[in-house]
Image (tube, coloured by chain):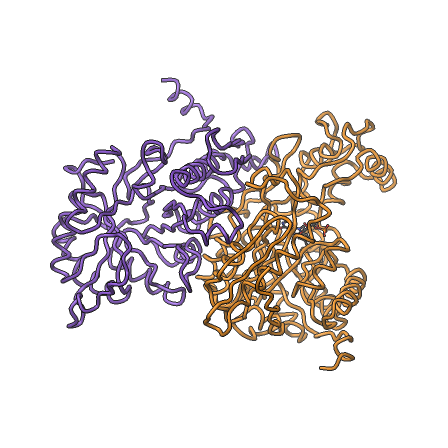
Chain colours: A purple, B orange
Amino acid sequence: MSSTEEKAGGFLAIELDGAGYESLARAVLAAESAGFHVATFADAPAPGRVNALQRAAYAGPLTRNIALVPEVDTVYTEPFHISTQLASLDYVSGGRAGWIATAANSPEAAAAVGRSIVEGDALAQEAAASIEVGRRLWDSWEDDAVIRDVATGRYIDVDKLHYVDFETPADFAGPAYSVKGPSIIPRPLQGQLPVLAAASLVGDGLVSVDAVDAVLVSAPTPELLAAEVRDVRARLGAVAIVAELDVVLDSRGQAAASRLDTSQDDGRARFVGSAAGLIGLLDSLLKEADGVRLHPAVLDVELEELSRLVLPELRRRGSLRAPMQDGTFRELLGVGPAENRYSTSAAATAAAGK
Amino acid sequence: MTQHNRAIFQPSGQIQFGIFFQGVNSGTIWKASESGSQTDFESFRHIVQTAERGKFAAFFLGEGLRLREHLGRPHALDVVGRPDAQTMLAALAAVTTNIGLVATQNTTYNDPADLAHRLSSLDLISGGRAAWNVVTTDNAWTGANFRRGGYLDHADRYKHAEAFVETAKRIWDSWETSSGPARRVLHEGQHYTVDVSPRLPRSAQYRPVLFQAGDSPEGRDFAARQADVIFSAHPKFDDAVEFRRDIVARSVAAGRGANAVQIMPASEFILAATDQEAQEKKAWVRSLQIGPQQAIAYLEQFWGRELTEYDPDGPLPEIDPVVEETSETRGSGFHGAKARQLADQWRAEAKDKGFSIRQFVTSRTARVDATFTGSYTAVADHLAEFARVGAVDGFNISPWLIPTGLDDIVNHLVPELQERGVYPTEYRGTTLRENLGLETPVRSPERVGA
Ligand SMILES: Cc1cc2nc3c(=O)[nH]c(=O)nc-3n(C[C@H](O)[C@H](O)[C@H](O)COP(=O)(O)O)c2cc1C
């Protein structure tokens, strides 16, 4: 991805998990009008939390510019269903969808579907397999497969549809499986949805760095975060990097520290303080990372402070890029058009032969 | 209500409409210039908002988990490729307010805890408008796309489906009050084990409405025990009345009320200002549904070989099929027919009626039984008779054109029906259960523990 010198500012993502289904529309519209580039939707098992992918889909027709990126587990969910659902999300959002591929490691998630628990490096193996299935299925219809050729009576050109014939690798730790394909939905609008994963899942012997478009980087404190971003960049090379940051802000005369819930430790760096302090931190983080994802302590409260004080100032300083206008999530990440691995078109065949 | 009253069927005098957006079929014409995209969100938005303007009870999405094939390759001639039902419906929930959102979802290639969670999610996001059309496709050919593969014997499909639906209902019913706390749900079965602490509260309609589509005796009994509405294949008047009798008997035998299970047959409407215009329109629609290539391909599916040397406007092939049985690769309707027997039968029938290949295939594939053709007033009169007798509770309409296929129904037929007092002029409520006039479901028994 882009080197730090030539960047036209970074992007900001906001985790909307605090928005229950009742206030989802309001929250996502507020995030979009505040100028956030990306909304993410967590899917860990918490009471009252509605399926992340459906929340993202619901937000699709309500918004125009903000990218919509749900977490979807790769271990205990069917890869074929995930691929179709995410492709569909891309259609209902006009090409603004992404996927945070997670690997559930809780015994509860395993028990819910009656499988034995997956742990350790096997988690990354499951994630890698699911991502590979998803990506092959997205390519299994070439972009121009729907031809509607009245003369020959053909709705599709079958030469542009492909069986993916995925099989889990020989050293696969979990139960082996295969997926035939092709997809039951044409190639998504973006061709390939951007896939994001925690940096801890990506690298040698884990999910290949080529399989993801961005990694989510965590550190225990805000001070260590920029250093961790640099380390991950050195370890993984050219992949977009998103720094993870919890935020608790001073609000309406209440000091952030007094609003802090210290019982919660999610292992992420946490900024606690004034809008001015956060602006300084984000300004420097956005020089190292391609984007920062904010996890607000209380969505409504933090979102108001962020949109009133923080984002306008970051924009003024030029450290934030302009919001997307009718763009795709791929364009935001700067990853370029997605080539189709199965492409039979003359141009692609010629290019591959070079 | 006494047992006596519950055993007597009482017609509601009303009919409702649903729209069935199938997404994969030869009924949706794509060759007309008015035909739009099958995947763009705008197509779905147009059609669901038209349906809501027409006070339709429900918007259905079909499902198929493997692309249909023709002689070992994807079938090229029909509309194909559709979004995931629940993802699309969650998006449509944002642009609608009253219409029910029905996802066809298979019991064989889903996990009960995951599917139940996603359906409650849709139910909550939509304010109590979600439904599940339960289907049981079980073949190994579809299974090739899933981790478990083709693990289920066809004979066990409803046994498995019943355990699945029971588990889902217990997950939905696990809340002590509308907001919690939830009871843990355990199920240990032949094919899977579920141990889950449900996380979502109940919705405004308590839990998703259950539709069932399947016509075998086992399927009907399953529906009589479990479903709120049957998506049936019997739209013709006499047949519909007979099907109603059968379902009332099965519902009562299952210990439910005579009116407990509603019936909405699949149907197609070809309408115009006059009967004559409607007949002309029908000829045009049929010519676009089954073209010459589709007619030949249809026979190839049963003959198991290419028949491109045959003239679509000539007689059926004299040669015999090279397969013993037809497979499921073109969808469940094609499964397991004895090919040679069929060929003999069809040749005789075509000869008898003087049909060419194309005419014969059109007569078999068009929604012949399911089609209501005529002027708006004539069709409205006919439907009013269905309502008076209680032959059906509504019709599930498959539009032959996307996305404008409901426009004339909503603009012209619905007002005629409203004038006759047999069709709602307003939604009764905001949940699907209210709009269908279904009772609040009885909470499923506790049965915590295996
Ligand atoms: C009107 C109607 C619509 C159906 N739609 C679907 C569908 O969208 N997807 C699917 O997999 N099966 C669909 N089915 C198939 C049935 O669910 C079922 O699998 C099939 O009828 C075999 O079950 P049976 O032997 O009980 O009839 C439909 C059936 C009917 C009658």
Name, please, the residue furthest toward the front: B449
Evaluate whether residue B407 shows in this view: no
The image quadrant of residue A182 is top right
Camera-side residue: B247 or B25?
B247
Residue B1 image offset from top left, x and y in percent: 71, 82
Q: Quadrant of the N terminus of chain A?
A: top left
> What count of labels does the image hold?
0
In the rendered image, the residue lying farthest to the top is A354
Q: Where is B372 relative to A337, above or below? A: below
Percent across and percent down for residue B355 are 81, 39
Q: In this image, B348 relative to B278: left or right?
A: right
Of the pair B437 and A271, the residue shown nearer to us: A271
Q: Residue A205 is drawn in which quadrant?
A: top left
What residue lies at 42% left-to-right and 54% top-to-bottom? A57
Residue B314 percent location from the top left of the image = 78, 32
Q: Residue B320, can we see it?
A: yes
Identify the residue at the far bottom of this view. B1
Which image quarter holds the C terminus of chain A? top left
Given residues A262 and A40, the one toward you in this image is A262
- The percent coordinates of residue B271 (x first, y second) are 66, 58
At 34% from the left and 43% from the top, the residue drawn is: A197
Q: Is residue A248 above or below residue A87?
A: below
